[in-house]
Amino acid sequence: MPPTPSTRTPARAAHLVLVPAALAVVLLATLLTGLTGSARAATPAVDAPAVQAAQAAQAAQAAHAVQAAAAVDIRLRRGVLVDPSSPAMGAARRDATYTPVAANTHTRWFTEAVPVDRARAAAASWADYGRQKNRTPMIAVYGLPNRDCGSHSSGGFDPRSYRLWVEQIALGLKGKGAVVVLEPDALGLLGSCAGQELWTSLIRYATYTFARNGTWVYVDAGHSSWHPANVMADRLAQSGVQWARGVATNVSNYRTTNDELAYGRSLVAALATRGYAGKRQLVDTSRNGVGPARDGTWCNTPHARLGSKPRVVNAGGVDFYAWVKRPGESDGTCNGGPGAGQWWPTGARRLLGR
């Protein structure tokens, strides 16, 4: 009869306990080894250099994407600021007929109506409003001595005051992502009247001053039916175009967008041969919806209609379509209009085809 547990000797009892424990350890080690081996067999070997190379490539692509986004200036990544204080906006509040004009009136014109001692604050206010709205503030600077050769838009500063005025506007816009269209018609009018002797040097000074303070300048270059591209390129070269972002065309005129784009390409090519490569174009589309009048009338042309809405283009060498000329504001006392720059409801309705 086998002994009962109570009759086993202490030594034998110890032996019987140790053997099962040793077997358990062996079995557990075998099981773990099998599981580990199975896991290793199921997971392919990792090529550490290949993984590192892939990670490096992904990081490089991400960095390139960030750099590419940063390389696109903020002015090309947001819309142009609408002017809430324009006469068109006031008219639209009273009569919704004018809303298509008011909603697309962007450019503020700085003339001697904004004197030297108020120019910096006025420019800064407009630019700060642009930051608030995340839109690009656009200004037409229009203050040369004997501006417009004494015609409908005559006026301007003396040379010294003009330089001071430009400096103050530039300081107000400094570093705020603004755009300036510089002196509409001036280079087109060269040789048309007395008192223009300093025009190119003053435009040159203005171009440099604005550019130095971080503002994009588009020097006005007339339009496609005014001067040949080579003639205008020479005038631009005398006027500091090397510091400008590019050229503005068709300001206050009616030439079709296609004609202006072709003219702009010719201008850019002509400037490149003179050592000023890479210039861009801004096209005024405010009144070119049906092109120029057949009889050549330019002042408050009844035939005109609104053109393409202002927008960032950033393609084909063109940065903007802009309404530099504010639709509904008179060219002067012609074809029934009031004084230059005054709101004219009849003219606005004509542009709307009403």
Image (tube, rainbow, N blue to C red):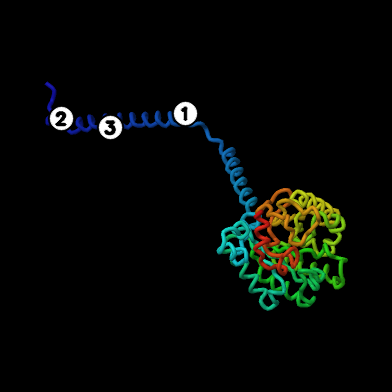
Q: Position of residue 312 (x, y in %)?
A: 66, 53
* Distance between the alpha carbons at the discs numbered 1 and 3: 30 Å
Q: Position of residue 268 (x, y in %)?
A: 80, 53
Sequence-earlier tag: 1 or 3: 3
* Distance between the alpha carbons at the discs numbered 3 and 2: 19 Å
Q: Dot 1, how many residues are within 10 Å of its Cα: few (below 14), some (14-19), or many (20+)?
A: few
Depth check, front residue: 328 or 319: 328
Disc 1 target residue: 41
Q: Secondary structure at mark 3?
A: helix
Disc 2 target residue: 8
Residue 154 visible in this rendered orientation of the protein: yes
Give the residue at x 16% y 31%: 9
Q: Are marks 3 and 2 in contact (CB under 8 Å)?
A: no
Point out which mark residue 50 bears: none
Sequence-earlier tag: 1 or 2: 2
Disc 3 target residue: 21
Q: Secondary structure at mark 1?
A: helix
Residue 71 visible in this rendered orientation of the protein: no
Give the residue at x 34% y 30%: 26
Q: Would you say 178 lies left or right of 21 here?
A: right
Marks 1, 2: nearer the viewer: 1
Q: Amino acid at mark 1?
A: Ala
Q: Are marks 1 and 2 in contact (CB under 8 Å)?
A: no
